[in-house]
Amino acid sequence: MDKYDRLLLAALLENGRASYADLARRVNLSAPAVADRVAKLEASGVITGYHAAIDMAKIGLPIECLIELRIADHESRRTLEALAQIPQLTFCHRITGDACVMMKAAVGSMPELQDLLDRLSQYGASKTSLILSTPFQRRLPATLQNGNGQEKRGQA
């Protein structure tokens, strides 16, 4: 990956629907060169998909939270398959530390959150944190922005 690939990734994180012409203007390459680079990033698995960002509150799910779960069952694969079937859970990460998984949930009300937590209790002990706001999301780590771990200031 060179600086152009990193610039393309940052631009696509900002707007996954940007045209090749728009991306080309942002990274100072031709549209065909951008199309070729994006195709290579997709083929190599660097770009894994394009996703819509959704305001959960505007679709009736104003309460979002992070839930840490310490899985009690040693057959965690079976538990993870069961968790995948719970519609309120929007993502799940296997993690290190006291908890086994970190999940994000979106619900319409506090009673719905309570029901979700009651449902999760069959799989182990949980700890829940309500999300108050999200100051930023979906950005590249600094090491991918410029390739050397040093932040570049004042550049778009």
Image (cartoon, grey):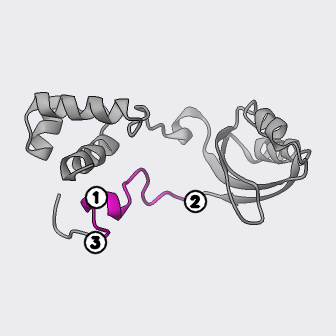
From this viewpoint, is residue 100 visible? yes
Residue 53 locus on image (x, y percent): 44, 38
Q: Mark 2 and mark 3 in contact (Cβ < 8 Å)?
A: no
Residue at 81% from the left image edge and 34% from the top image edge: 82
Classify residue 56 as left or right of residue 107.
left
Asked if the stretch drawn in magenta spans residue 1, the answer is no
Classify residue 112 as left or right of residue 55.
right
- Magenta region: 132-150
Q: Could you give the CA–CA distance between mark 2 and mark 1, rounded to whole angstroms?
A: 28 Å
In the image, what residue type sits under mark 2? Answer: Leu
Marks 3, 2: nearer the viewer: 3
Residue at 83% from the left image edge and 36% from the top image edge: 78
Picture layout, residue 134 above or below residue 90: below
Q: Could you give the CA–CA distance between mark 3 and mark 2, rounded to whole angstroms?
A: 31 Å
Residue 155 locus on image (x, y percent): 16, 62
Residue at 15% from the left image edge and 35% from the top image edge: 22
Residue beneath disc 3: 150
From this viewpoint, is residue 19 visible? no
Q: Judge by depth and name the residue closer to the eye, 62 or 67.
A: 67
Identify the disc placed on residue 145: 1
In the image, what residue type sits under mark 3? Answer: Gln
Marks 2, 1: nearer the viewer: 1
What kind of element bears circle 2? loop
- In terms of sequence position, does the residue under pointer 3 or pointer 2 come before the other? 2
Residue beneath disc 2: 132
Q: Could you give the CA–CA distance between mark 3 and mark 1, rounded to whole angstroms?
A: 9 Å
Picture layout, residue 24 above or below residue 123: above
Q: Judge by depth and name the residue closer to the eye, 62 or 22.
A: 22
Instruction: Tell me the quadrant of the picture where the C terminus can be found.
Output: bottom left
Q: Mark 1 and mark 2 in contact (Cβ < 8 Å)?
A: no
Q: Main secondary structure of the magenta part?
A: loop
What kind of element bears circle 1? helix
